[in-house]
Image: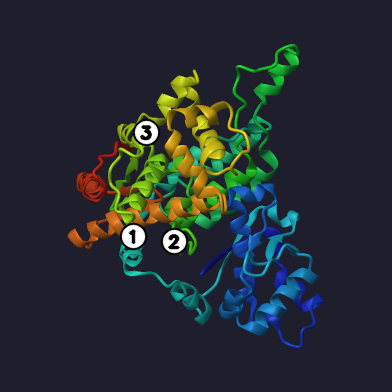
Amino acid sequence: MQYYIPKSLLDLPDRIIKEINTGENLETHHMEKIWHVIDKLYLESLYRKDHEHGELIRLHSKVCERLYQSRAWGKIRKALVKLNIIEVGDSYQPSIHSKGYQLNEIYLNDSFAVIELPESYFNKKLITKDNWNNTYKRCYSNLYKRITIDYKSAIKHIIQKLTFSNEEIEKKVWSIYERLVLCSSPNLNDIAYCIDNEIVGDGMVALENLFLSYRLEHPNKYSCPVKKPERYTYHKFKFDLLSILKIANKQLFFSVDDNSGRVYHNISNIRRELKKFLMIDNSNLVGLDIRNSQPLLFGLLLVKKWRKRKTTSYEAMPDLKEYLQRCCDGNFYDHLMELNDIPVEQRADYKIQFFTDIFFSKNPKKVKGKLKQFADVYPNVYQEIRKYKEPDYKLLARDLQKFEADVIINGIIKSLFKQNKEIPIVNVHDAIYTAPDFAPIVENEIYNYFMNEFGVTPTLNRE
């Protein structure tokens, strides 16, 4: 079993012996559990995008007590707080969310080390603790032996994204890469240690901020035609490197969100641009992504509700028919962008803004701007959105994710496994990935499911 921890905590067993007096030897009986807590908090800080903005990591006390044993969890938590390794938030609310934790900032910004421990009762318990249903088991258990990654190309890709303070550091990076990655039997932990600890922490510098440069040179301009570059930070590099190493080392994880029904695993966690290096049965993955999927799924959710009321006609809501047709044709966003004179290259930014303003925000008192335009084009659809968010504006997002999981996992994937139990398949929310030979079968099943269930045919993107 491998645990990823901040490198400055390698001496933790000695610090526990020296500074903690619990009446029970934590470092002897519970050290693996301590490593697991630190590993979880450290990796979650990298995997969660919102954590960079101070979001605490919620650990449910009852779950921790079952996993680590009740008495042990209390002692572990107190010891890590006393050693100033973890911080405990004060935002606990019964029946709303659990107590929040995070590693001390000096450890969050630290390079990582890998602790490798022999098989034990505790790590066997970790492997079997998830209660998967049959569809989940079939979908993901058969990937453990079949999923791989071209880690040589993937690590080369993320190194090329870095900028360095001088040429000597850059030369050293590539010499380490050639020595450790291009050899016949590389030790992936050595790659992680050398690139992360010896080089990147000291050698990487921020990319030039073109936006600020332009504003300084043109102080009278209110807008900037140069898009602000996204910094490839040390935090992002560590996230990518760990994601690559975990798949290469067959450290695959899987969890189900009880609230949304969404599944999270290595493939959903790895950054989109690195998915091209993933392979199933030594073939590159093929992704089938439903175009305009979230607006389409919301429209179909309305259709499903109408069916329960025994109303299937679009006559009472004619704009829903146009709404669904544009989603199925794959030009829903493009149509709204044309109405707003938004260029095609800003499509990704527009989609984010669309969801923020229309689907996932609180109901505004006054409808104006782009929101008013959407309400004018699709008045009945917009009123249904408002009704959905009246009791709780977060309800729409949760129900949409549940409906997505029901359609993709319990509908399409379940049907595919009935046809072929060994089909290599994995979904990343509303996208389905498979091997090239199976792509036509998956594609056909997606079309059949939507036609049989809802009478529509979506447009698919193939990547």
Q: Residue furthest bottom?
A: 23
Cα separation, mark 3 vs mark 2, equals 45 Å
- Closer to the camera, 128 or 417? 417
Q: Secondary structure at mark 2?
A: loop
Label of residue 399 in the image:
none
Label of residue 143 in the image:
1
Which numbered disc, 3 or 1, marks the residue that appears first in the sequence? 1
125 relative to 40, above or below: below
Q: Secondary structure at mark 3?
A: helix
On the rendered structure, is 210 left or right of 389? Answer: right
| Circles 2 and 1 in contact, beta carbons < 8 Å | yes
| Residue sitting at x 64%, y 67% | 98
* Residue 14 appears in the rendering: no
Q: Residue furthest front?
A: 316
On the rendered structure, is 155 left or right of 439? Answer: right
148 relative to 271, above or below: below
- Closer to the camera, 97 or 438? 97
> What is the x, y in percent for residue 190?
55, 55
> What is the x, y in percent for residue 38?
64, 65
Q: Nearer the viewer, mark 3 or mark 1?
A: 3
Q: Which residue is mark 3?
A: 319
Which numbered disc, 2 or 1, marks the residue that appears first in the sequence? 1
- Closer to the camera, 312 or 82? 312
Q: Which residue is mark 2?
A: 252
* Residue kind at label 2, given as amino acid type: Leu
407 relative to 126, above or below: above
Q: Quadrant of the C terminus?
A: top left
Which numbered disc, 3 or 2, marks the residue that appears first in the sequence? 2
> What is the x, y in percent for residue 274?
45, 42
